[in-house]
Amino acid sequence: MTPSPRPADRYSPLYFLASLGAGGLAVTFFMYLMFWVPHPGQPVPVFEDIAAAWAAGGPALKLAIAAAVTGIAGFAILNVKSLVWNLRQMQAFRRTEAYTKLRGSNAETQLLALPLALAMTVNVGFILGLVFVPGLWGVVEYLFPLAMVAFLAIAALAFAQIGHFLGRILSSGGIFDVTANNSFAQLLPAFALSMVAVGLSAPAALSTVPSVVGLSLVLSGALGTVAALYAAVAAVTAFASMLQHGTARESGPTLLIVVPLLTVLGIMWLRQSHGLHTTLGAHVEDAATFMTLTKILAVQLAFTALGLLVLRRQGYASAFLTGDGNSPGSYALVCPGVALSVMMHFWINKGLVGAELIAKFGAAYWALTAVALALQVAMIALVWHLNRRHFGQPRAGHAVPAE
């Protein structure tokens, strides 16, 4: 059989999810530093905290720090490299007939993968600054307004794309193919808005300037609310179509999009709660935090079980992960695993430990943390596998576009 071109040579905006997944894995490594490295004086660890922990820590802590720093740097590079590649490919893609066809179909919302990936890269950039730039905390207040401007610009792009899509389908009847809405692909705009919202919420948790905290609370709250509303409407309409027509096979991974969506909104809520406490005097009890995170995790596990059940019944893995078929939508499988890993860290540390239900660094702590670490390792392996299939040497087979 004559080798086919690389699947990535047949471009789809869903390849922005490759950049998103790499950025998400950088965040999973930051969890090591966030919860295992002492950082008195500020809510997140910075370069000086990491250096002090390295100097005073034992072999286990040094190993964790080395793994974290290496993982953050490596996946941040992959995140940016993939983003740049996608931006170049998108520029060429806009001049093709395929792009025109995409803009006139249900799949137009795939374009929201662009602002989604951009927002993730800005978040990764902030992590890089915290971890690798000495003295950053001394000037961080000057960076918060710049970060919010960047996120607002991304939000403007996302709303422009959403506006074009909704304006087109709502102004005329019969344009939106309801029978092809049998997946959660239409939740991608909500995911993009939520990623912007969590970025806008960072100053609420980290700034000590009341006006900056207030602006962060307003902007992130507004974006998060719109994201949740959009997700609810899109999910209800899509689920009705799936009940009637079944789930589109190529878009099966979108059933899991609720998982990263809830992790992002959950982190936004934690950041807002911290800002409300430190700046406005409103305190959220540790028990309430534990219960909220538990409910979020429960919903995520329910959708994970549902998604994996459908994927197994449809033979998705044998079709697109190990067989001859390749779908750029397969990169959507990375986000749920990454999101569950990150949410596990927050549930364990902010929930269970915060409510004093388990001891930090005790046996139960490490048993639960092992689950988060296992998910992280699995997603690293999946990213390596997908990158090899889609961006490696040409292989026998055919590319299957995601609908």
Image: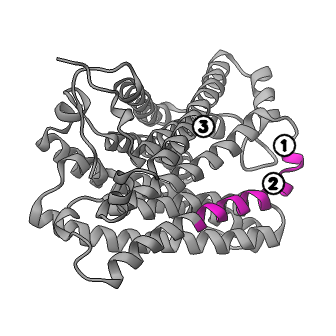
Quarter location, residue 29: top right
Quickly name the residue at label 2: 143
Amino acid type assigned to the residue bearing label 1 in the image? Leu
> Which numbered disc flags the more N-terminal residue, 2 or 3?
3
Q: Mark on residue 80?
A: 3
Number of the front mark, 1 or 3: 3
Q: Which residues are magenta?
A: 137-156
Q: Which amino acid type is shown beneath numbered disc 2?
A: Leu
Q: Which mark is residue 136?
A: 1
| Cα–Cα gap, marks 2 and 1 | 9 Å
Q: How many marks?
A: 3
Under circle 3, the secondary element is: helix
Vertical side of 14 occupied by 160: above or below:
below
Left or right? Give the position of 107 relative to 215: left
Mark 1–mark 3 distance (CA, rounded to whole Å): 21 Å
Q: Position of residue 2 (x, y in %)?
A: 21, 18
Q: Dot 2: within a 10 Å radius of its alpha carbon, few (fewer than 14), some, or many (20 or more) residues?
A: some
Q: Can residue 357 be seen by looking at this rendering?
A: no
Residue 79 sits inside the magenta stretch? no
Find residue 370 and report its horizontal and vertical position in percent: 44, 31
Q: Is residue 397 above or below residue 255?
A: above
**Marks 2 and 1, the one that precedes in the sequence:** 1
SS under mark 2: helix
